[in-house]
Image: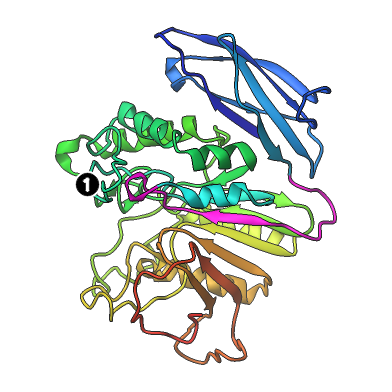
Amino acid sequence: MVIWTRVTPATAVLDVEGSWEISEYEDFHEVAARGAFSTSPSNDYTVKIDVQGLQPARYYYYRFHALDATSPTGRTKTAPAGDTDSLKFAVVSCSNWEFGYFNAYDCIADREVDVVLHLGDFIYEYGTGQYGDSTIGRTVLPPFEIISLRDYRTRYSQYRLDEGLRNLSARHPMISIWDDHEIANNSYSEGAQNHQDDEGPYSDRREAAKKAYYEWLPIREGGKHYRSFNYGSLAEVIMLDERLEGRTRPPESTSDTSYASPDRHMLGEEQLSWFETRLIDSTAQWKVIGNQVIFSEVDQSRVYPKSPRNLDSWDGYPAERKRIVAYIRDKRIDDIIFVTGDTHASWAFEVAPDPMHSYDAMTGVRLPLPLSLAPPVCRRRTGMNMKPQIR
């Protein structure tokens, strides 16, 4: 279990020493574990502790002490082990500071869930007025598009001022994955739509964004960003990195000669092989896939006549998607749910090998995947071509 905080010195100092403690009791009359920490400007005074030896399926309270002050108390919950009959998780994504307060986070904080899955776009990189609404005076810092490490750190720091985000972070554990806006719009391994040559090397920006992300979120470092978590016998949560690990540049259109090429990757060979192994080796009943962009086919021609497919989603990588669906079908892997961010609308899909042919929407015949979901619950546009797999 990773617990997180940030120390804010009143004046610039080189290093800050402090301590932490964690307990099953909110008054800390018995302490399960404690220790010391040191933080400095090198990690923006953030603190992360990977606490070992906690009991499964338990609530724990934690707090930090530094600079003669004590942090607010946080609460977390460990994953269950063995037989498990229920799991409640919240799915969130796409929090844009200028579009308004993060009230949905507050709603989740008030509910009892086992874990929050954040599927990306924890922040947005745009400057004031570039993608948002300043009507309520909620403008971003810095006021320009963020590019440097200092820029990204400032933006994360501002986001942590939102009361809803603070309440959510103090109430529930979070498993997170980045999407594109933690770096730049429509990012991939070696570039991004919203990165220009006059902004410096993309690799510098990407690494700055990654460093700030790891500093400001309670996530383990040192391994691959894609990873999995077991919730007893009931579920395995598999988080995919669909941006920086192996994604190749998206096609410009479906008429590109390389559009359907097997050399076009969303995950990359190494991650794809790992994903297939996790699916076939999992002993959990349900496999919950943390997925940043819509996995299912979507015909959006009625809304965007010039862009019938969102090529930044899995519709831009049909060969790799086809391989995944075929693998699930051929290996007869059951009970898979893809949960999705990115889309700013609510969807439910049934995923078939070929949803336009040989597929019965009433019976689900030839249906290898149960569901693909995308939050939040809202409707922004109507008029999509309602294909049989779209619910």
Residue 80 lies in the magenta stretch: yes
Residue 40 lies in the magenta stretch: no
The disc labelled 1 sits on which kind of residue? Gly
Q: What residue is disc 1 on?
A: 129
Identify which residue is drawn at 35% across, 78% down.
Answer: 382
Picture layout, residue 160 above or below residue 302: above
Q: Image quarter for residue 280?
A: bottom right
Q: How is the image coloured?
A: rainbow
Q: Image quarter for residue 203?
A: top left
Residue 261 x %, y %: 35, 68
Using residue 32 as the reference point, say whether residue 278 is left or right of it: left
Q: Is residue 274 visible?
A: no
Residue 383 x %, y %: 33, 81
Q: Residue furthest front?
A: 136
Tag 1 secondary structure: loop
Q: Residue furthest left?
A: 198
Identify which residue is drawn at 52% across, 73% down.
Answer: 348
Q: Image quarter for residue 124?
A: top left
Picture layout, residue 384 above or below residue 1: below
Residue 8 x %, y %: 47, 18
Query: Looking at this view, is 87 or 234 the one in front?
Result: 87
Picture layout, residue 169 above or below residue 326: above
Using residue 272 as the reference point, say whether residue 159 is left or right of it: left
Q: State which region is magenta.
A: 79-100
Using residue 131 as the reference point, say whether residue 267 is left or right of it: right
Identify which residue is drawn at 71% across, 50% down.
Answer: 230
